[in-house]
Amino acid sequence: SGPAPSHFWLVESTTFASHELPVPPGSAFGPARLNARGTAVILPAAEGAQQGPFLVCTIAEDGACPLHELDPSLPPDVVLDDVRELSVSRGWVVYTTRPALGDGFDVHLAALDSLDLPLLIASFPTASALRTALAPDDGTIYFDVTGPQSLEHVAVDLGADGPGPPVALHPPLIGPELAYTWAPDMSALLLFSGADEFGDLHLVEIDGASAGPMQLIHADAPGHAYHSPRAIAHVSADGARILYISDHETPGTTQLYLVDRAAPGKPPKRLNGPLTPGERVRSGAFLRDPDHVVYFAHTPTEPAQARLVRATVEGPTNNQTLSPPLFDAMIDSVKESADGSRLVYSAHSVDIGWGLHYVDLTDP
């Protein structure tokens, strides 16, 4: 019997015009997903379906998306794990296989017009989790390799002469609390390592499959960087500055700091204004206006309260609270409109649960 046959549509986000595209007879899919850039489609087979484990396609300008069946021949003790990346400009797919039992991943690259001729480009036999990312020009693929209390990043050059060897971008990080974030243009990594929510924050400059040394942020205050629940740090849109949280001036009380990317080891500039007793900065981010940031100030002790504050990159003298204090609440996330004139943020309170709040930045 098996699942009912599926249909496949693409919908244009601007005009909402829909295109039904042909699928192999009898195909049945699980939830479809786009690649990170929205230029390709990955269709996993539904449980019990008769076609291969994945169908993939790249989206043409006219909405065409001819499907390719990905069903590599594998040993009985190896399974197809996932489709990781699809490149429209270069016409290839990257997928991973793994042992049927235990940890480890093998990474394969194949041209969409010759899926039966894959290349093995990397193996991570001890990894318990693996994430991938592509450089903006699709010329390099990056791997976030996670093991038991370990984290490393590896790059493979996907140049015209064929994939290069895997290259480690930094020494493995070891510890119970590990995290990372990329610069918006993938030109740098920020790495956090610590025994708990406090630890060290390092900058690693990236150029394709090459990396510079690990540079400690604020070299005179190791161990004080704070791993916020939302992010470990942020790189500005122009790549010139790094925003992060630390308690190096006030141990136990986290505050918001800015450091120049060109001199990450120097003392940073504090951006938040005075905090009330027991209050601390929990999270922060750059706004689209390059001269402003926003942060959440939170008092965890009774009576717990939270507020949203806008600050300038010049320092703590021009802070503006954008919301009245929310009692028994925790601000969770903030989103900015495309033109930078509005903010929407969510907060969770004991009494009402989740709530959505709106701020007009032209008249806060």
Image (cartoon, rainbow, N blue to C red):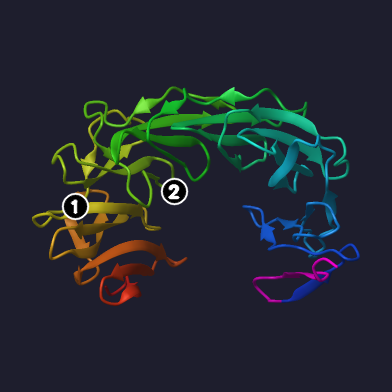
Say which label, 1 or 2, has the lower sequence index: 2
On residue 237, the disc is 2
Secondary structure of residue under mark 2: loop
Residue 353: image location, x then y, percent: 32, 73
As drawn, the residue found furthest toward the right would be 25
Which residue appears at 44% of the width and 45% of the height?
238
Q: Is residue 296 magenta?
A: no
Residue wearing tag 1: 280
Dividing the picture into quadrants, the one containing residue 47 is bottom right
Three-letter amino acid code at disc 2? Ala
What are the residue bounds of the magenta stretch?
1-16
Tell me: residue 227, above or below residue 66: above
Which residue appears at 67% of the width and 40% of the height?
138
In the displayed structure, does residue 346 sit left or right of residue 51? left
Tell me: residue 87, above or below residue 362: above
Q: Distance between the residues labelled 1 and 2?
A: 26 Å
Q: Can residue 2 be seen in this view?
A: yes
Q: Does the magenta stretch include residue 13?
A: yes
Q: Can residue 85 be seen in this view?
A: no
Three-letter amino acid code at disc 1? Arg
Q: Residues within 10 Å of mark 2 (few under 14, many from 20)?
A: some
Tell me: residue 182, above or below residue 316: above
Residue 274: image location, x then y, percent: 12, 54
Residue 230: image location, x then y, percent: 37, 52
In the displayed structure, does residue 219 sit left or right of residue 129? left
Which residue appears at 42% of the width and 36% of the height?
190
Q: Quadrant of the N terminus?
A: bottom right
Residue 249: image location, x then y, percent: 14, 38
Instruction: Give the number of the mark in front: 1 or 2.
Output: 1
